[in-house]
Structures are given as C-alpha cells and as structure tokens.
Image: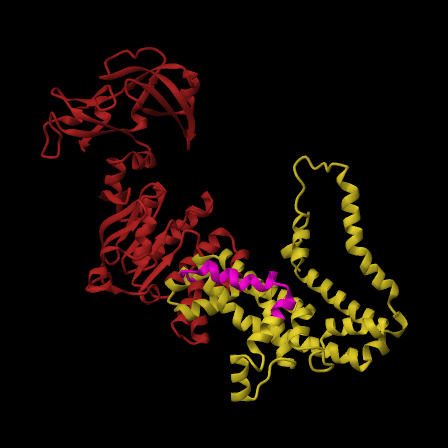
Amino acid sequence: MSERRERTRQHGPEPAAGRVPLALVPAAVLAVAFLVLPLFGLLQRAPWTDLGPVLRAPAVSDALRLSLFTALASTALCVVLGLPLAWVLARAPFPGRRVVRALVTLPMVLPPVVGGAALLFALGRRSPVGGWLDDAFGLTLPFSTTGVVIAQTFVALPFLVITVEGGLRAGDRGLEEAAASLGAGRWTVLRRVTVPQVAPSLLAGAVLAWARALGEFGATITFAGSLQGRTQTMPLAVYQALQRDQGAAIVLSLVLVVVSLGVLVALRDRWAPAG
Amino acid sequence: MRPLRAEAVVRAGTFTLDVSLSVAPGEVVGLLGPNGAGKSTLLRAVAGLTAVDNGRIALGDEALDDPAAGTRVAPERRPVGMVFQDLRLFPHLSARDNVAFGARSRGMRRAEADARADAWLNRVGLSAQSGSKPPQLSGGQAQRVALARALATDPEVLLLDEPLSALDATTRAEVRRDLRTHLAAFVGPVLIVTHDAVDALTLAHRLVVLDGGRVIQEGTPAEIARRPRSRWVADLVGLTLLAGRVEVGGSVRLDDGGAVVATALGPIGPEVPAAGDDVYVAIRPRSVALHRRRPEGSPRNVWPATVEGVEAAADRVRVATVGAVPVTAEITPGALADLALAPGDAVWVAVKATEVDVYQR
C-alpha cells in the first residue's frame, strides 16, 4: 500500500517546462512493465473454465469466508480503537506525543513476521498476559481465529490512525467553535460536527485498514498459524496452494487482485489526483 | 435584559488586548480598527472562545469570566450568539439543520427544533432554501442562515464579526438593510466588528475604535466620522488627518512640517484649542481646491504641490498631493479633465480656512 502511495504521488502535475529527458523513458517503461507483467502472467495462467469449481473447493471457500470475516472484524476493531487514538494525537497536546505517534506507526514499517513473533511472545500462553487470559477466561489467542483478527489489527491499525489524524488536522476547528457557541457540549460537538467532518478520512482509513488486513500474511502465519477454516486466510491459502494446486493459487490471487483494484478505485480521488 | 460589561485583558505573544467596554441592552456598538487591533479577540473573549488573562466579563451581575474569582463559563453555557466572519456553517447539514443546531444541542426535540428553525428561515426570507446545504447557497443566503442560526438560540448578547465582509456590493446593501431590521428587533447588547465605514455608520449606535489592543476613540458614528483620532479611521471616512500644535494667531504648526490656518479656532468655548495645545487637523477632500496657476483672491491656505496619485471614488476623483502639507483633494471628473492632471504634475493647492477642523489631540 505504501509503495503504491509513493508511485501515485509521482504522477502529480508535470513541471512547467513539461519536457522529460529522453534518457528516463526506457527506465520508466521498464518499471511499468515490471509492475504490470506479473499480473498479466497471472491472468494468462488462470484456469478460466474451472473458476467456479475451484472457488467452491472447501479449502478455497473456507479461506474466502475466513478472510472476509476476519478483515471486517479487524477493521471494526481498528475504527473502535483508532478513532479515539487519532483524536487524541490530533487534538490533545501531551508530553511525548511525538514518541507515541512514532510507536503507533511502527507496525507500518516493521516486518510483519517480527510483529507476529512479538504478538506471540506478548500474548502467548506462557506470557504474563496470555497466561492470565488463559487462566481467567480460558481464552487462547495464538492459533485461533481471534488471533488472526489480532494480528491483522496490529498491522492495519496504524493506517487508520494516520489517515484519520490527518483528516482531523486538516479539519476546520472553527466549525467546532461555532458549535460550542450554539450551545453544543464536547460530546455533541464530537458527534455532530467532528465525526461527520472526518467521515471521508475515516472511510478511507477503514478501506485501507481492511485492505491491509485482507492481505496480511507474515504476522498471521507467525501468530495464528495456517489451519484451514480457523486461521488460514486467503494469502495463507495462496501460499499453501502454490505447493499443491497452482490453479487454486491463481484463482485466489485473482480474487485478491480484484479486491486491491477495487480499493484503488475507491480511493482514487484521494491518492491519484487527475494529472 | 442585562447590560454587557467587558473588562478584558488577553495576552497572546507580544500582543495584549486591554479593553474596557459596556454595551446597554438594545444598544449596537461597532468595533472599528485595523487588522490585528484586537476586535475579533474581544468578541471571542465575550463568547468564551478565548480565555481572558485578567479582568471581568459580565452580563448584569452574572460573571461569565472572572479569572480572579476562578469563574469561567464554558462557551456552550453562555447566552451569547455569534456570527463568524467566515460564517462557519456546518457543510454537512442543511440550512434548516444548521439553524436548528442550537436548539437540538440544548436538548430540544427534533420536531420542535425544526419548527423553530423553519420560522427563523422564514423570517430571513429563506424558506425555499431550508433543505439546501451551505455549499449550494449564495453568499447572501449563507449570511442570512448564519444570522438566523445565531438568533435562533435566543441569545442575550449578539456578536457579529464582520458580518458583511464576504458579500459583493449589491448583496451587501441588501443584507445590510435586513440586518438593520433584525438588530432593531434584538433587545440585548450587540457588538459588531466591521471594516467598512458604511456598515459602521449605518448599523451602530456607538463606535469604539481599537488599535494595538486598546481603545483609542469612542463616540457616536457622527462624531467619529467628523473628528477621527487615528489615521486608520480618517482613511476609512475619507478625511485627511494631520497632527500639530496651535500657534498664537490661529494657525496650526504641523508635526510633519508646514502650517494651516483655521478660522474654527475662534474663542468659542472650553473645547476650543488654545495656543500651545496639541491638536488634530481634519481636512475634507471636497474642500480642497486644485489650480494650475496660483489662485487669485486670498484663500489663507495656499501652497504649491505635486500630484502623487489619481483614483476614482464613486462620482468623484480623489487626487493625492504632496507639498507643504500633504492633502487629498476630491474633485469632479470634469474638473480633472479641465486641469489635465496626471501624477508628477505641479499644482496649486488651496484650502479655505473655514473648512479646516481643529480639535484637541
């Protein structure tokens, strides 16, 4: 996602002179080919005639169902946790705010496998927190569907927080003052003015978080494993299918490509300004 | 109805607002002054959006702000309605929901709040636009919605921050007329910030001029327009304002050089400046005559000058001159054509001594 953001930024308005040095053109063409050709390879190898049966195969349909559910659940969790965090980061000045923001964005740059390992050590049955959860509630997070949701939330939350915080910062504080002058208390201001104002950012952040959760691989396989029907999400299923049934792997991959394209289209106004 | 009393000291970086001001119920006080004079800060302090560092803001006996006593009423609990310079209509709400916002925030039921909002929209002539979102409204319509929204909360005090500045000339005149009607119907104290001479002179009963965070002049619009005490107000009302000291014999030696003679310096009363007094000299541009040759007869104030600039002003032309005394003349376009004046030309300036106003500094 972040690579894609960098690329689309460079598509901005051309410089006034508007003339690109010819020497850059071959490299640019090569770059496009490099990014697009693998997708064509996927399309070319797709077992178009068997699409239905492959999608209905238990391993594939289980992964699809699990992925949709866990990605939605972790997105919901991201919104519930991320909106207040974004609000605090954007609006409440407190000492160490920059450090907190840096820590919050860490999972964006952290290798997901490391995140998964960290979760395992923090929430595993032998860790203090994991042990307590196990003793008190009989709740075991690793290698469970809940674990998948936690791993996905871990990597997706920063995307939502950063996006919504940006929206809050760009928002018009004046409207909140106007609301206060009309007799609205803090909660009413938040509910009727602030949240509607950041709704586009919230939506964009949620779509991003959802896409990130859907594509999550490293943290999930490390923390939750790859058990069909319980923790094997689409990316894990793709990886496993590659070793046994390439057709299924390609079909699953195509589904993820279509979803990614959908996200790009949904966010086009935000990231890909006409140029 | 309670009077508003504001003694406000607000410090922000190097700027300090230090103003003491009372507004009676039903009175409309206009706040005038250059950018950064502290006008908006004063309104924000009254609305509770900016905290005062010292002083006291009160409605009658009820303190809204009194740092010494630890009193600070939150903005949402003040009976104060505000129209912001940039209007600040909620872009995601319809005109009706904008106007109903105050009542809804105070816990009124939706149907009732909507009915009140509709009544207010009707009063400002916008019944047809009640479903429109702010981006679909024209400047004048948005302005009316903002006014209705502030008035719909039944405030005791009304604050208007440059309410007409965003409007074009035609709409401005129209909205100004309606605003006058609404202000006349409003029974509480009103503070209105303005940058515009016509707004100040037509809407306010009393004007307070701020500069650098302090009150530098206070009076009726007529007094202020006739005898300004700052360059800013003089420019606003189109007078040439000079500072000087009265000399024996009835002439005024100006601080920046030159002198003018004024017959207004007769022995008429206690307010009349005497020799040695520091005074302001106000010269109306229409009383300044321009000639290509030294004028015949004996106007007492005559000096050679150079035309600095020429600009159109309504049906007249304003000619700025630099000479012994820098003054602006306002002449008819016909006179300008006869004189064939352009910047850099030499002219003779004549001002009748009877047309020069002199008053205590």
Residue B96 visible, this orientation: no
Q: Main secondary structure of the magenta part?
A: helix
Residue B298 visible, this orientation: yes
Residue B196 in percent (x, y) is at 36, 42
Query: Closest to the observer: A84 or B183?
Result: A84
Q: Is residue A26 above or below residue A95?
A: above
Task: Look at the image and give the colour of chain B.
Answer: red
Q: Is residue B63 above or below residue B326?
A: below
Residue A21 covered by magenta stretch: no
Task: Look at the image and give the colour of chain A.
Answer: yellow
Start and end of the magenta stretch?
A92-116
Q: Is residue B6 above or below residue A240?
A: above
How many tags in the picture? 0
Q: Is residue B301 left or right of residue B317?
A: left
Residue B205 in percent (x, y) is at 26, 49
Q: Is residue B250 left or right of residue B123?
A: left
Q: Quadrant of the C terminus of chain B?
A: top left
Query: Closest to the observer: A157 or B339?
Result: A157
Residue A110 covered by magenta stretch: yes
Residue shown at 81% from the left, 74% from the top: A241
Instruction: Return the residue found at the far right.
Output: A49
* Quadrant of the image occupied by residue A203: bottom right
Query: Closest to the observer: A236 or B98?
Result: A236
